[in-house]
Image (tube, rainbow, N blue to C red):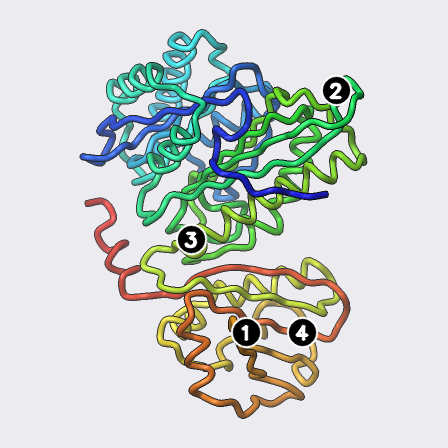
Amino acid sequence: MKIDIIPGGVTAAAGFKAACCAAGIKYRGRTDMAMLLSDRSCAVAGTFTSNVVKAAPVVWDRQIVQNVRAARAVVINAGIANAATGETGMAMCRQTADFTAKALGIPADQVLLGSTGVIGPNLPLDRITAGVTMMKQTLSNNLEAGTAASRAIMTTDTVNKECAVAFELPAANGQGTVKVRMGGMSKGSGMIHPNMCTMLAYITTDCAIDSALLQQAVSDVVADTFNMISVDGDTSTNDTLLVLANGAADNEPVAAGSAAFAAFREALFTVCRTLAILMAGDGEGATHLMEMKVTGADTKEHARTLARSVVGSSLVKAMIYGKDANCGRILCALGYAGVDFDPAVIELYLVGKDDTLCFYRNGCVQAFDEDRALAILSEKEIRFCCDMKMGSAEATAWGCDLTYDYVKINGDYRS
């Protein structure tokens, strides 16, 4: 099944509008609120932080995803996380949802919320409601509105993150196929570590699919996309991935185990993987995207564990920043991952755009040309591959280097 990459983000799918505004939540001189609205009620699915300390909007959204299983709108703010705010934070969620519902003429229990930023402060309700009022007036289904929304939810991100795809599914009337679209946006630059999906991400699609099947696809896809990235080893209190499907494409409703479900899952995987890699490459202070591919593992989970261990290593991250071909740090990270393997048989490679170097084979570090290694490590995207020689399972994880700027950014985050 062909997946076509198309322009846009959350407004690429039919029936979705977006807006943003500068509400002055924390930032000045930039947009800091975004809104998504579907013309019709959507099936909804999501995954949320595994952190025991959960922000109020996470608690709010999880209840809607698990119990209501329908949504019409999402309201997101950047700057203040509405986390560690107790009952005041939950009251803010209720008041925001009630105000938004009245403004848009939709049920309050179909208003999802997202917040990102500093943990602890309370959100200013007057600025939130003023922002909702402003955004109601500018909701649009054009691609530019989706892009603007993706910029509004940024915190320490240096670039906005969005993507969209199109694919064909059988038509509801049984006559041929229809084009289905899916688009997404995400934010995430710090507090990124694979333990659900440390960020905010929103995906919209005009596919007809019920909420239970949508949740199955989302939970499955997260394991090899958002759960395979790491910037700094910190899992946020606000992690949220929400997927809304409104059925506007008029495809035959997707059935479990069907070719249509496989096609939908592949499209969702493409969007999630793209957004995940964009976040890994935009880690706070990062200068390089790092990819670790593990092949030949005995199980899928072991492959994931090994790959995540390498991209999560501070020493490996520092090695990438310094362009130092110290492969012992990668071997060390593989060794403490918690997976049993035979070091005498594995093979480790540094892979560039036009060159590949073997770092380790037959239990020994291999001699290699330092200048060639430096050239590869100077590329924007750094790739390693390790063949475990144990089986056929494989997995890929993504991260970034650790730089002085990461400390500078987080040393004065609240200011």
The residue carrying mark 2 is 172
The CA distance from mark 1 to mark 4 is 13 Å
Q: Is residue 272 above or below residue 376?
A: above
The CA distance from mark 2 to mark 4 is 45 Å
- Mark 3 residue element: loop
Q: In this figure, what is the number of numbered marks?
A: 4
Q: Is residue 252 above or below residue 315?
A: above
Of label 1 and label 2, which has the lower sequence position?
2
Of label 3 and label 2, which has the lower sequence position?
2
Whether the residues at callouts 3 and 4 have beta carbons within 8 Å, the answer is no
The CA distance from mark 3 to mark 2 is 45 Å
Tell me which amino acid carries mark 4. Answer: Asp
Whether the residues at callouts 3 and 2 have beta carbons within 8 Å, the answer is no
Tell me which amino acid carries mark 1. Answer: Val
User: How crowded is the residue under tag 3: few (<14 C-alpha within 10 Å), some, or many (20+)?
Assistant: some
Quadrant placement of the C terminus: top left
Q: Nearer the viewer, residue 352 or 155?
A: 352
Residue at 47% from the left image edge and 13% from the top image edge: 108
Residue at 34% from the left image edge and 30% from the top image edge: 77
Residue at 70% from the left image edge and 83% from the top image edge: 345
